[in-house]
Amino acid sequence: MSGEADIETRRKRLLYRSIYRGNKENDILLGQFARAHIGSFGSSELDQYERLLDTGDNDIFDWVSGKADVPAEADTPVLRLVMAFRVSFQ
């Protein structure tokens, strides 16, 4: 499998994980975010996003909603993109 095919498979897997998390709020946020951004992510951004998806739903929700401070080890450019992302309910 070529490098580009590998990255495309990885993007699809991460998109699926974004949409079907089990927490409705995060399903919506991360699903829309992934649809909007994941296609332009390179390997480094995909690594950051994958680490974010390995984080618990409550932590992600608390960070994005401002209920908790983001720990230094989780503070990545991709998380900042997620935090700046606005969900569309149209």
Image: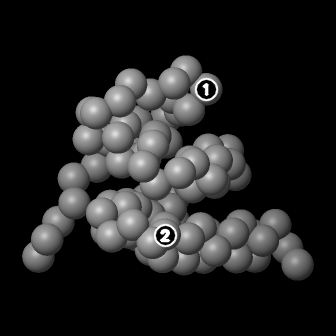
Asked which secondary structure carries label 1, the reply is helix
Extreme-right residue of the structure: 1
Location of the C terminus by quadrant is bottom left
Identify which residue is drawn at 88% across, 78% down. 1
Q: Nearest the camera: 26 or 58?
A: 58
- Which residue is found at the position 55% from the left and 21% from the top? 72
x, y percentage for residue 5? 75, 76
Q: Residue furthest front?
A: 58
| Residue 85 visible in the snapshot | yes
Q: Earlier in the sequence, mark 2 or mark 1?
A: 2
- Coloration of the structure image: one colour
Residue type (three-letter) at the residue carrying disc 2: Arg
Q: Amino acid at mark 1?
A: Glu
Left or right: 63 as drawn, with respect to 15: left
Residue that mark 1 sits on: 73
Q: Which residue is mark 2?
A: 21
Instruction: Name the side, left or right, on which 83 lies relative to 73.
Output: left
Give the quadrant of residue 83. top left
